[in-house]
Amino acid sequence: MPLFQHLSLDTASEFIFGNSMDDLCSPDSHKEFLDAYFYVQRGTAVRLMLSFIDKHVDDALMRREKGDITGAKEQIRLIDKMVKATQDRLTLRFQMRDFFTPAHDDPAIALSNAFFHPCQSPKT
């Protein structure tokens, strides 16, 4: 995997800037640039994730204001249950983020393993 990352970095920099970063030959030569690039990418990803969560928190708070979180007619939402306990936007934001990660990653990992391992020995 790292070799392909170095190769794609060299290819992309050659195509975009006209000069290869020669990352395959000397991986540490542009470390400062790459560290800054990945730092900015993480910041952008965090902002996108938080704006997505904030929208849902705001929607849930609005439903609570309207008295529309009964759950009788609509689907049951964890966020609506959380809004009954607190209306603090930051608390809700971080709790929803903390719930989403294991709710997303763990089933994906389990399903991947459930399909991967039988394929490794199809006779069993």
Image (spheres, helix red, strand yellow):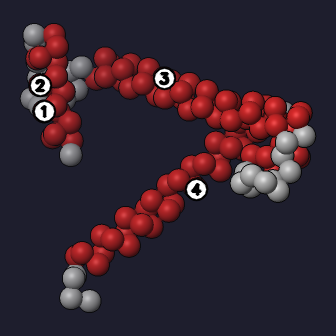
Residue under label 1: 7
Marking on residue 71: none
Label 2 vs label 3: CA separation?
24 Å
Q: Which residue is mark 2?
A: 11
Label 3, residues with CA under 10 Å away: few <14, some 14-19, many ≥20: few
Q: Left of 33 or right of it: where is 28? A: left
Q: Quickly name the residue at label 4.
A: 103
User: In the image, residue 81 lies at what x, y percent?
Assistant: 81, 50
Q: Residue at x 70, y 39 (%)?
A: 94
Horizontal and vertical percent position of residue 3: 15, 40
Labels 2 and 3: the sequence-earlier one: 2
Image quarter for residue 113? bottom left
Q: Nearer the viewer, residue 39 or 77?
A: 77
Estimate the spatial distance between the alpha carbons at disc 4 and disc 2, rounded to whole Å.
37 Å
> How far apart, in angstroms, are the residues tagged by discs 4 and 3?
22 Å
Image-based side of 106 in relation to 30, left or right:
right
Outermost residue toward the top in this view? 17
Q: Which residue is mark 3?
A: 44
